[in-house]
Image: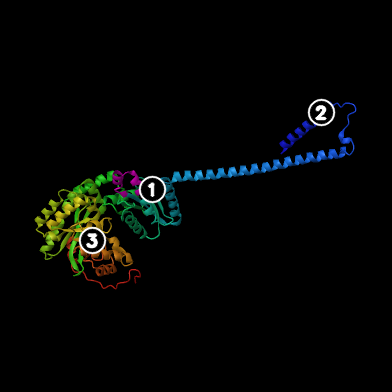
């Protein structure tokens, strides 16, 4: 305003100066008459007043217009600043989103995942809470990309992310590391929450086609590490969960595995342990335990399942998962498998000679052993060597093992069937292709996975699932075996639902051959059944 007043004053002086200069320079001829002064012309005083009023009015209008212009300009400036601030905020949010989230699935990326795990670690330390890191990798995703292209693979990843996200609680986190790797950070409120969530994720991912108008299917393998049970740092939790995930891959895929200390063995430790394992084959370090299988109709032992054990001279009993996975990776599992098959059939011959001719022996086949070209000949030779009826030998294979190469698996199973050997589908119900291929498998037995048995007395859904499996198996002329029976109520439910055979700690733990003979006459407890939704 001050600059404008100065400019106006300067302009006024210029006008006045020009006016008086002009007046001073004016010359009027003698006898000229001023019209304003003749007659009723305007008086000088009034003329001066009129000029003053008009001048003041013009100045006032100029000042008002100037003030209004300044107000408008200020408002426009504030509006521009506001728009600029909003644009900067939006841009900052977009940059943050891009820096901390995966562009394909819009899930948190590795950087944000690390921050959340560190935050969860601090909360766990302060409040004494527990949480789990779940490392999930898709099975067969590379084949999908190779066969259908990256566009289909990207759509599959988005569908997996959406299905998994729908199962989580608001305070849980799902992140994508890249490729087909996902990580979940899940708060643990009850111990049973974790396996329940893992099974639901496996079911959601592998239960059916993931894309509309497309039959593409994948499964998932999940490794789990818990804070503070296994580790109390972000790096260790991620490493342990990753190690557990690879164990799930090696155990047949479409499964979840909880981290164990032995999974963190270094390469040198694994090499030494493998060397010890090779020396243990054929020695007393390796031996078999037998878990009884109870026939529901007679309530007596009908056979046993052979389970391999290793007592290391320095480390004591080695968990089966530890040395069997090591043997599978090294190829030693074929030699160990032949030894176990021979020992189990030899023991079965001894039991038959002792008067238990009807007893059967179940022997587990690992995925690597199942793909051996010598397996059929090994089975034929051991049957002839110990002169046992083929129907008394039951070979157990997991559902996921069969699904790795269905055509080859079917041909091998049909050869076993022609030989007369029993075939048991283990862990039934955990794979995504069960119903599709079951009618083509020459199986004689279905083993209901313990995951459906564990909550049987509290879950009406598990009751329905078990009942459906029993009905399906019987319709296909197969026996039904339920494993993992640990309570009398579970036993009563399974018997009522029509299972033919039962296994579990309630009925007998794995023991050596000498002690096994004591388990041939198990008493049957009387149990009152409760409603699965309202257990008594």
Residue carrying label 1:
176
- As helix, strand or loop, the secondary structure at mark 1 comes to strand
Instruction: Identify the mark nearer the N-term, 2 or 3.
Output: 2
Q: Nearer the viewer, mark 2 or mark 3?
A: 2
Q: Position of residue 236 (x, y in %)?
A: 37, 48
Q: Position of residue 274 (x, y in %)?
A: 23, 47
**Which quarter shows the C terminus?**
bottom left
Membership of 147 in magenta stretch: yes
Vertical order, 240 against 62 (above or below): below
Q: Is residue 395 left or right of residue 198?
A: left
- Pick whichever of labels 1 and 3 is earlier in the sequence: 1
Q: Give the range drawn in magenta.
A: 138-157
The x and y percentages for residue 318 are 25, 53
Q: What element carries label 2?
A: helix
Residue on which the image places disc 2: 22
Instruction: Answer few, some or many: residues within 10 Å of disc 2's Cα (few below 14, many 20 plus, some between 14 and 19).
Output: few
Callout 3 crowding tier (Cα within 10 Å): few <14, some 14–19, many ≥20: many
Circle nearer the N terminus (2, 1):
2
Task: Tell me the CA gap for discs 1 and 3.
Answer: 35 Å
**Magenta stretch contains residue 248:** no
Q: Are marks 1 and 3 in contact (CB under 8 Å)?
A: no
Q: How dense is the environment of label 1, judged by Cα within 10 Å: few (below 14), some, or many (20 and up)?
A: many
Which is more toward the observer, 25 or 287?
25
**Front-most of residues 197 and 189:** 197
For residue 27, the mark is none
In the rendering, which numbered label is found on residue 447?
Answer: 3
Image quadrant in which the N terminus is located: top right
């Amino acid at each position: 305003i001050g600059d404008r007043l100065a400019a106006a004053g300067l302009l006024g002086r210029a006008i006045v100066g020009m006016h008086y200069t002009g007046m001073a320079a004016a010359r009027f001829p003698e006898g000229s008459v001023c019209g304003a002064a003749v007659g009723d012309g305007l008086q000088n005083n009034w003329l001066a007043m009129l000029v003053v009023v008009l001048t003041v009015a013009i100045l006032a209008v100029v000042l008002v217009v100037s003030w209004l212009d300044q107000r408008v300009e200020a408002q426009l400036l504030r509006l521009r600043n506001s728009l600029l601030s909003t644009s900067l905020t939006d841009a900052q949010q977009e940059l943050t989103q891009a820096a901390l989230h995966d562009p394909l699935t819009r899930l948190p990326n590795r950087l944000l995942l690390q921050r959340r795990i560190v935050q969860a670690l601090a909360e766990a330390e302060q409040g004494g809470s527990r949480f789990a890191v779940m490392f999930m990798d898709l099975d067969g995703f590379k084949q999908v990309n190779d066969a259908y292209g990256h566009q289909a693979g990207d759509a599959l990843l988005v569908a997996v992310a959406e299905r998994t996200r729908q199962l989580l609680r608001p305070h849980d986190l799902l992140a994508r590391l890249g490729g087909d790797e996902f990580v979940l950070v899940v708060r643990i409120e009850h111990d049973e929450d974790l396996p329940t969530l893992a099974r639901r994720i496996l079911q959601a991912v592998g239960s059916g086609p993931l894309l509309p108008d497309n039959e593409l299917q994948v499964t998932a393998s999940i490794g789990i590490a818990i804070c503070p049970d296994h580790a109390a740092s972000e790096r260790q939790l991620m490493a342990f969960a990753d190690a557990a995930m690879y164990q799930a891959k090696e155990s047949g895929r479409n499964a979840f595995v909880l981290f164990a200390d032995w999974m963190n063995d270094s390469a040198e430790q694994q090499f030494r342990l493998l060397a010890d394992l090779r020396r243990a084959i054929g020695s007393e370090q390796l031996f078999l335990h037998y878990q009884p299988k109870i026939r529901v109709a007679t309530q007596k032992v009908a056979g046993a399942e052979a389970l391999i054990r290793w007592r290391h001279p320095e480390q004591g009993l080695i968990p089966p998962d530890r040395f069997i996975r090591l043997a599978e990776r090294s190829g030693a599992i074929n030699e160990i498998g032949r030894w176990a098959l021979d020992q189990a059939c030899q023991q079965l011959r001894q039991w038959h000679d002792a008067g238990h001719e009807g007893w059967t022996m179940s022997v587990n086949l690992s995925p690597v052993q199942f793909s051996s070209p010598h397996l059929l000949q090994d089975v034929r030779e051991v049957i002839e060597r110990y002169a046992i009826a083929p129907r008394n030998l039951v070979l157990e294979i997991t559902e996921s093992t069969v699904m790795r190469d269905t055509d080859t698996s079917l041909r091998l199973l049909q050869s076993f069937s022609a030989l007369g050997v029993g075939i048991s589908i283990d862990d039934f119900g955990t794979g995504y292709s069960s119903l599709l291929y079951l009618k083509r498998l020459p199986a004689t037995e279905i083993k209901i996975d313990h995951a459906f048995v564990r909550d049987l007395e509290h879950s009406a859904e598990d009751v329905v699932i078990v009942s459906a499996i029993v009905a399906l198996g019987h319709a296909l002329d197969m026996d039904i075996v339920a494993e993992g029976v640990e309570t009398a109520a579970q036993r009563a439910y399974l018997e009522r639902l029509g299972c033919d055979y039962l296994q579990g700690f309630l009925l007998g733990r794995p023991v050596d051959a000498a002690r096994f003979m004591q388990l041939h006459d198990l008493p049957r407890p009387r149990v009152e059944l409760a409603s699965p939704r309202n257990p008594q």
